[in-house]
């Protein structure tokens, strides 16, 4: 059993390191975390041996605990774990590690992780080299003055073709450090991972020391930043707290800076990687969460609404100003969420309330649709985020939902000078209403695309077709240097970083998959928000037998609306079942019809019982049927039944097509 030497509180922080693993998607963050947890004995070792690296590891992405993370092989939530590591200096260190997501939609998870860290491990895949997200996450770490330890991962894949060295140089150029400082590792086999643990101890600074005690205060008062929280049906809200100052222990009375509510600490502990009460952890050797530590706190907070990420807890008896918090990223993609079962609103409401506690970047407001009934308008960071949220509702709460078409926020400036930002297409004015609007603006992004330069032409075409404007085009330094004819793989060929200004709306559906397909998977893409710009947008309505289907209307750029209208009318025709009467589907902007599709009615054989030769009777029956149908049609305007499943399929089809997982045809069958 290893015990942290009992240092006085002022020195103990020196044995603590708080760091995050950051990288582009799939560069091996979660795998590296598995190996570090194994090597420090935090989790049982996997059945791998350094002598037989080809043997598969058994611990796979142990910090990716959500079903959606395991199914999709992506991290969507930052996860923390505390490890104890005996360094070569003979001392035991407490390492608080945070595994972060790589996808841009979960950037807010990376940002809050960085606030609780003093350093980062920046991983780069030896086969892929520096990618778009490598640049953006590094930028965030540098903005916060964090120490960056660079590591090239997947070294087991490196052959004698110079690729590994080229990637190593690329990363050292980026970090402006000596190539010798970059670690070479294979997170999968565990090779070199010991050097990461050593670098964490030696290069990442400990949390800042406590100020000396003054005559009036015997010790520093407690201040802790809440950087994660989740809901437990028995204990209520569990908050993950990074202790910036002082210490907190069981029985302490603490106060939330945001709500002013007082609580008593009922239990607290560390994540190792599961929750372990501090009193029970053999290595913690302390009954308190001390300065520099990160751990969970249960304090009888029953209402998830009282839990705020970025909140500061302090001792009730020693009020302190709140710590610098992090602003939640603004939601940029909005969609209506409705229960598939029309009576399931209350259950869905509770599920959303619980889930938004673990994912505070989702905004939620009630809304109602004439077609779908009561539901919610939720705001997300991007379309993958939206899709993951929908899957979590299903996986974790059994809630099947209909998700309407996503929309980015649109700013309207009216003639009288008032401004309004709308997140629901139903609120966008029709052509008549637009006469009162002097300015329509949509959010833009600054996109970073990194790709081998042979794909430059195709990428320019793709961006242009998505209304993109080029900003810059530069070579990744060392890849330009290795552009020689000796390069034997695409990863060694010169690579470019292209910056583009693009409307956010143009990239929320198919842009990413299109980029991957035109670049054979070699291009990577990331973006950051840019200011709003003027845009010629209009609202497209979908009409069924002349009746507006509010849940299907959308806002699109005028240059794209015709194509969209045709696609949607066609798609609806495929999913709406034939009915007793004709169904006409139209896409329209104001009174201008852009597309029309018709579903022919069933024709009941009213002459079936008649023998041949009764021509006049047959004609009479057919005439009667025609008149009856006309009446039926008149009455049924607005009463066309579109099965909810069909609706679900048509909206889901959009998602499926976007991800390229299945064609619409497959969906139909
Ligand atoms: N050959 C090889 N494969 C690796 C290595 N490290 C990770 N991988 C594989 O790379 C894939 C992605 O690894 P993850 O650890 O999930 O990557 P990640 O960066 O956490 O992914 P996100 O969280 O989705 O961004 C998995 O299939 C891993 O098995 C390595 O050192 N060598």
Image: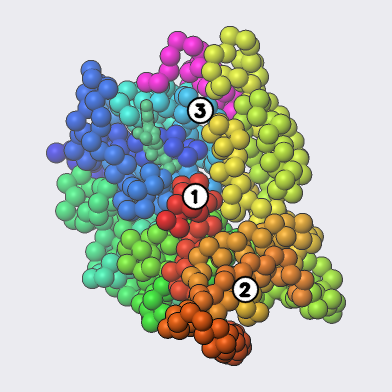
Frontmost residue, 634 versus 139: 634
Pair 1/3: label in front: 1
The residue that mark 3 highlights is 128
Q: In terms of sequence position, does the residue under pointer 2 or pointer 3 come before the other? A: 3
Numbered disc total: 3
The residue that mark 1 highlights is 663
Residue 584: give its label: 2
Q: Are marks 2 and 1 in contact (CB under 8 Å)?
A: no
Q: In terms of sequence position, does the residue under pointer 1 or pointer 3 come before the other? A: 3
Q: CA gap, disc 2 to disc 1?
A: 25 Å
Could you say where residue 29 lies in the image, as x and y percent from the top left? 40, 38
Could you say where residue 18 lies in the image, as x and y percent from the top left? 40, 43
Magenta residues, start to end: 156-181
On the question of residue 328 being in view, the answer is no
Could you say where residue 244 lies in the image, as x and y percent from the top left? 42, 54
View extreme (front): residue = 613
Could you say where residue 481 lies in the image, as x and y percent from the top left? 64, 16
On the question of residue 203 being in view, the answer is yes
Q: Secondary structure at mark 1?
A: loop
Instruction: Name the residue: 51% across, 21% down.
Output: 168
Q: Is residue 168 magenta?
A: yes
Residue 527: give its label: none
Q: Quadrant of ligand 1?
A: top left
Q: CA gap, disc 1 to disc 3?
A: 29 Å
Residue 517 position (above or below residue 281): above
Q: Secondary structure at mark 2?
A: strand
Which quadrant would the C terminus be assigned to in this image?
bottom left
């Amino acid at each position: 059993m290893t015990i942290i030497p009992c240092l006085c509180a002022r020195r103990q922080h020196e044995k603590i390191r708080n760091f995050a693993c950051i990288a582009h998607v799939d560069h091996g963050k979660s795998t590296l975390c598995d190996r570090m947890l194994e090597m420090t004995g935090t989790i049982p070792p996997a059945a791998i041996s350094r002598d037989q690296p080809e043997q598969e590891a058994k611990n796979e992405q142990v910090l990716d605990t959500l079903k959606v993370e395991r199914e999709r092989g992506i991290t969507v939530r930052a996860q923390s774990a505390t490890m104890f590591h005996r360094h070569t200096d003979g001392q035991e260190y407490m390492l608080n590690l945070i595994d972060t997501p790589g996808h841009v939609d979960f950037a807010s998870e990376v940002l809050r992780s960085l606030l609780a860290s003093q350093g980062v491990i920046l991983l780069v895949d030896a086969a892929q080299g520096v990618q778009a997200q490598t640049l953006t996450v590094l930028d965030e770490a540098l903005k916060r003055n964090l120490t960056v330890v660079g590591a090239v991962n997947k070294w087991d894949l490196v052959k004698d073709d110079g690729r590994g060295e080229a990637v190593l140089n690329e990363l050292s150029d980026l970090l402006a450090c000596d190539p010798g400082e970059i670690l070479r590792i294979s997170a999968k086999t565990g090779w070199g991972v010991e050097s990461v643990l050593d670098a964490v101890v030696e290069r990442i600074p400990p949390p800042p020391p406590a100020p000396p005690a003054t005559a009036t205060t015997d010790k520093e008062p407690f201040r802790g930043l809440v950087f994660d929280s989740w809901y437990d049906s028995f204990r209520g809200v569990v908050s993950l707290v990074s202790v910036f100052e002082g210490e907190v222990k069981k029985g302490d009375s603490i106060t939330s800076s945001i709500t002013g509510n007082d609580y008593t600490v009922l239990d607290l502990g560390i994540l190792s990687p599961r929750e372990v009460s501090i009193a029970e952890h053999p290595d913690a050797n302390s009954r308190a969460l001390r300065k520099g530590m990160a751990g969970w706190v249960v304090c009888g907070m029953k209402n998830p609404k009282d839990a705020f990420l970025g909140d500061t807890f302090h001792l009730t008896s020693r009020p302190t100003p709140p710590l610098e918090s992090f602003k939640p990223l603004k939601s940029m993609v909005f969609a209506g969420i409705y229960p598939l079962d029309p009576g399931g609103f209350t259950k869905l409401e509770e599920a959303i309330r619980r889930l938004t506690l673990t994912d505070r970047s989702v905004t939620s407001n009630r809304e109602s649709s004439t077609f779908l009934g009561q539901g919610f308008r939720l705001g997300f960071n991007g379309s993958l985020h939206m899709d993951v949220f929908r899957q979590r509702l299903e996986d974790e709460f059994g809630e099947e939902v209909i998700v309407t078409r996503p929309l980015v926020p649109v700013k309207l400036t009216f003639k009288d000078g008032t401004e309004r930002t709308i997140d629901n297409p139903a609120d966008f004015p029709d052509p008549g209403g637009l006469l009162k609007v002097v300015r329509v603006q949509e959010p833009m992004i600054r996109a970073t695309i990194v790709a081998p330069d042979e794909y430059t032409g195709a990428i320019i075409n793709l961006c242009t077709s998505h209304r993109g404007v080029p900003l810059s085009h530069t070579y990744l330094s060392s890849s330009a240097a290795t552009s020689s004819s000796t390069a034997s793989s695409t990863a060694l060929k010169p690579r470019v970083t292209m910056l583009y200004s693009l409307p956010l709306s143009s990239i929320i559906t198919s842009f990413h998959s299109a980029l991957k397909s035109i670049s054979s998977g070699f291009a990577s893409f990331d973006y950051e928000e840019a200011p709003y710009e003027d845009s010629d947008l209009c609202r497209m309505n979908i009409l069924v037998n002349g009746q507006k289907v509010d849940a299907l209307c959308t806002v699109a750029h005028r240059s794209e609306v015709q194509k969209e209208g045709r696609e949607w009318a066609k798609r609806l025709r495929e999913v709406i079942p034939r009915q007793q009467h004709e169904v006409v589907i139209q896409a329209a902007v104001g009174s201008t019809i852009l597309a029309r599709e018709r579903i022919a009615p069933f024709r009941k054989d009213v002459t079936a019982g008649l023998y041949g030769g009764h021509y006049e009777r047959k004609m009479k029956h057919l005439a009667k049927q025609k008149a009856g149908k006309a009446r039926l049609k008149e009455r049924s305007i607005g009463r066309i039944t579109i099965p909810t499943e069909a609706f679900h399929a048509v909206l889901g089809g959009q998602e499926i097509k976007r991800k390229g997982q299945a064609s619409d045809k497959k969906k139909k069958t």
